[in-house]
Amino acid sequence: MADIISGIAEAFQLILSGDPEIYGIVSRSLFFSGTAVILAILWGTPLAMLIAMKDFRGKTVIKTVLNTLIGLPTVVLGLILFLIFSRGGPLGFLGLLYTPAAIMIGQAILVTPILVSIGVSAIESVEPEIMNLAQTLGASESQAQIAVLKEAANGVILSDIASFNRAIGELGVVLLVGGNIAGGGNRTDVLTSAISRATQINEIGLAIALGILLMVVVFMVNIIVVALRNANYIVELAKGPYSKLKRSRETER
Amino acid sequence: MTMVIAELKDVTKAYSNKIVVDAVNLQIHKGEILGLLGPNGSGKTTILKILAFIENPTSGEVEFQGEKVNFKNTEKTRLQSTLVFQKTTLFSTSVYNNIAYGLKLRKVSKETRDKEVKKALELVKLEGFEKRNAKKLSGGEQQRVAIARALVLKTKLLLLDEPTANLDPKNAGILEEVIDTVNRENKITIVMATHNMFQAKKLPHRIALMDGGKIKEVGTPAEVFGKLSKNLASFAAVDNTFTGTANPTVAGTSVVAVGNGVQIEITAQRKGATDVFINPQDIILSKTAVDSSARNVFKGKITEITDLDSLVKLKVNVGKPFTVQITKRSFNEMGLCLNAEVFITFKASSVQVI
C-alpha cells in the first residue's frame, strides 16, 4: 500500500516537473497515433463511402468481416505484421521493422475496421433522398456523395475518435513491430509500451504518471473534437482547405 | 406558336420488370404550368424524376430544349431543371446553407448568393430565417424552404411533386401563391404532380391525367374536368370523390345516391350519372349532430387518423369513406380516437360536380 501511495506522489511530481523524457513519450504517442488515424481516414473514408453508397455482390459479407475485425486482438495483428516486416518476410526488404513507420502503418491497419464500420452505418443512416436532392440542385455524382458524407458528419467524426482511442491505447502493435526502443535517433517507445516497461522494472511512479497522462490525452482529444464539432469547424474543414481563402477573395470583389 | 421546352417520346420506365411509366408521350410547353393528376402509384413521381434527369428511362427518348438528352451524362442538363420532392428533404444545416447550396455549385459569388437567398425567402414569406436550423422548422416552413431552394436556381424547368400534399391550408395557400407568381413573373415552366383535384383545377394551364403509368388525357382544366369525368372518377385514390345517380328535388337542388344509402345533396340540377367531389376542408366534424343550414349530415365512425403537422386528417366511414381535415387543436379538444362516432356536415354548395 505504501508503494502505491509513494508511486502516486512520485507520479504527480514527474508530471508537474515537466520531465522532457515523459513529455517526449506523450508527443510520440500523439504523433504516431494521430498519423495512423489520418492514414486510416485517407483510405477508410472512401472505402466506407463505396460500401455504403454502391450496391454490389458480397456487400453483406464485407460488412460482417469488417465488424468482426473490430475485435481483432492487437497482439495478433502485431504478430502478423512482425512476420510480414521481419527480415525474411515478404516486406522485409523495406527495413520497416522496429521503426516509427511500422507503428503508424500497423495502427492505421488496426483502426481501419472501426473507422469503416462506423462510417458505413453513419452514411447508410442518411436519408436516401439526399443523394437525389443534391443532384437535382445541380451536384455532380461526387459532389452529391460529399453532400451525403456531410449529413453523416456526426457518425463519421465518431468513427475517427473511436479509431484514435483504439490506436493510442493499443499495446500489441507498438511492442511487436515498434520494438519499444527507448534510445537513439528513432525511438519507438510510446505511452502504452513505456507503461509496460516501467512496470516490469518496478518504476511504479513513472508507470502511474504515464497512465495518468494517457488518460488525460484521450480525454483532451475527445473534448477538443467535440468542441470543434459544435463550433462547426470540422464541417468547415471538410469543405476543403481553400474554402476560407475563396471566401475572403469573394468579399474583396 | 407554342414552344416546346421538353418532350417525352415513348418513355417507359421499369423497375425489376414492374412497369411504372408505360410508353408516355408528353410535351411540356414553355412558360406553362402543367399538372400531372392521378392517384398514388400512377407514375407521376417517376416522370418528374426523368424530367429532372436523375432517373433514366428504360426505353424511349427525352428531348430538352430541342436536344436529345444523353442520360449517361446529365451533369450539365441537370443544372437547367430541378425537382422539389414530395417528402421534404433538407440538409442538416442552416436555412441559408440549404438555399445557397445550388448557387454555390454554380459558383455564384457570395454577395449575389446573399441577395438571392434573401429574395427567395421573401417570396416564400420566411424573411430573416437565414440563420435558423432548417431541420427545426415546422413541416410547412420546411417545405417552403425546399421550394425557395429550388426557386433560387431559376432553372428553365421547375418540377414539383405534390408540393402541398402534407400541408395545412395556410402553408398550402402560400405555396400556391408562390407557384403562380414565379410562373407569371419569372416565366418559369412548371410541372407539378398532384392528386388534389381542387389544386389541379386552380393552378395548371394544362392537365395530364395519369393512371397505371399511362397518360389518359391531356387538356385544359376546363376540358379535363368538363368532358372527361369518367377518367377522373375512376381515380379511386382521390379523396372524397363519389360516383352516383342524381335526381332533382322539388327545392331545385338534386340528390346524388352514391351507394350504401349515402345521398349527397348538391345545388346543381342534375339527372343521371354524376361525379361529385367534396373538399376535405369544407367538411365540419362534430360529436353530435349540429343544428345548421347545411344540407348534408351523416353519422359515421373514424377509421383512420393521420397526423399532418398542425392538422389531422381523418377518414370517416358513413357508408362511404369521407376524408376530413381538422386542426390538431380541435382534434385534441374533441378527444377523438379511432372508432369514435362522429357526424360530418357540409353544405350542398360545397359539393363540386366534376
Image (cartoon, coloured by chain):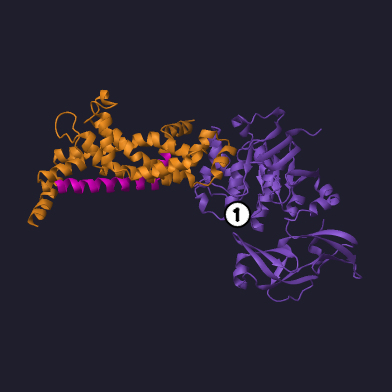
Task: Please say whether residue B211 is visible from this viewpoint.
Answer: yes
Other-residue count near label 1 (Cα within 10 Å), few / some / many at <14 / 14–19 / ≥20: many
Q: Which x, y percent locates residue B238?
A: 73, 56
* Left or right of residue B349, residue B16 in this image: left
Q: Is residue B167 above or below residue A132?
A: below
Q: For the residue marked with disc 1, what is the amino acid?
A: Gly
- Magenta stretch prevailing secondary structure: helix
Q: Which image quadrant: the N terminus of chain B? A: top right
| Extreme residue in the front direction | A88
Residue B22: name its quadrant.
top right
User: Which residue in the rendered view is the most extreme toward the left?
Assistant: A2
Chain A pictured colour: orange
Magenta region:
A207-236
Location of residue B248 (image quadrant): bottom right
Chain letter for the purple part: B
A77 or B253: nearer the eye? A77
Residue B278 lies in magenta, yes or no? no
Task: Estimate the x, y position of residue B24 in percent, counting from the top left.
Answer: 75, 39
Q: Quadrant of the C terminus of chain B?
A: bottom right
Callout 1: residue from which chain? B
Read off the residue under disc 1: B140
Quick check: A79 left or right of B192?
left
Instruction: Mark yes or no: residue B294 visible.
Output: no
Examine the rendered structure and indicate whether residue B37 appears above or below residue A184. Answer: below
Looking at the image, how many numbered discs can be counted on the residues? 1
Q: Position of residue A31 (x, y in %)?
A: 26, 36
- Viewer-nearest residue: A194 or B168: A194
